[in-house]
Image (cartoon, rainbow, N blue to C red):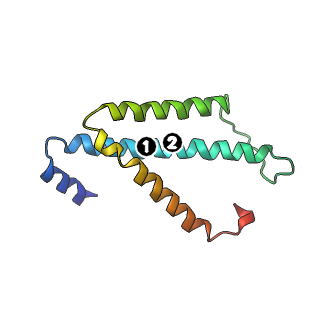
Amino acid sequence: MYLAGVLLNLVVPSRAFGIATSTASLGVLTTWATILLCQARLKAASERPGSPVDRPGFRMPGSPWTNYATLLFLAGVLVLMADSADERPVLALVPLIVLVLWIGWRAIKRRFPADAL
């Protein structure tokens, strides 16, 4: 990562910091969106009749509505990022991030039996 920062500073020194912070922001947004989507799937799985999944004792307050509201907020942040000329090129990385996560999940999923997931 250090080498990427050095190269970025050589190519676009005036925008290097903005690009780096925008990229970090995408990581944070992706992480939180993943957590919220997994929490929604866990809740849905626990409510199915005969499901072996139990709802945990600690629950998200206001779930599932706060879950949807937070996802909507994160989508709003992405819209605001698209409005900024400095962050727009980095925003183009979102499909790449989603693709890498999906490929990683498909690769890892094969290692587990279907009933374990």
Question: Who is closer to the viewer here, 55 or 78?
Answer: 78
Question: Who is closer to the viewer here, 54 or 86?
Answer: 86
Where is mark 1, residue-wise? 28
Who's the residue at 47% across and 34% down the image? 75
Question: Who is closer to the viewer here, 106 or 58?
Answer: 106
Above or below — where is 102 with respect to 59?
Answer: below
Q: Viewed as shown, does residue 94 lie left or right of 20?
A: right
Amino acid type, residue under disc 2 in the picture: Trp
Q: Quadrant of the C terminus?
A: bottom right
Q: Give the x, y percent position of residue 24.
A: 35, 45
Q: Quick one: label 2, few (<14), some, or many (20+) residues within 10 Å? A: some
- Disc 1 + disc 2, Cβ < 8 Å: yes
Q: Quadrant of the N terminus?
A: bottom left
Residue furthest right in the image: 50
Who's the residue at 29% across and 32% down the image? 84
Tag 2, which secondary structure?
Answer: helix
Who's the residue at 15% across and 47% down the image? 12
Tag 1, which secondary structure?
Answer: helix
Q: Give the x, y percent position of residue 17.
A: 22, 42
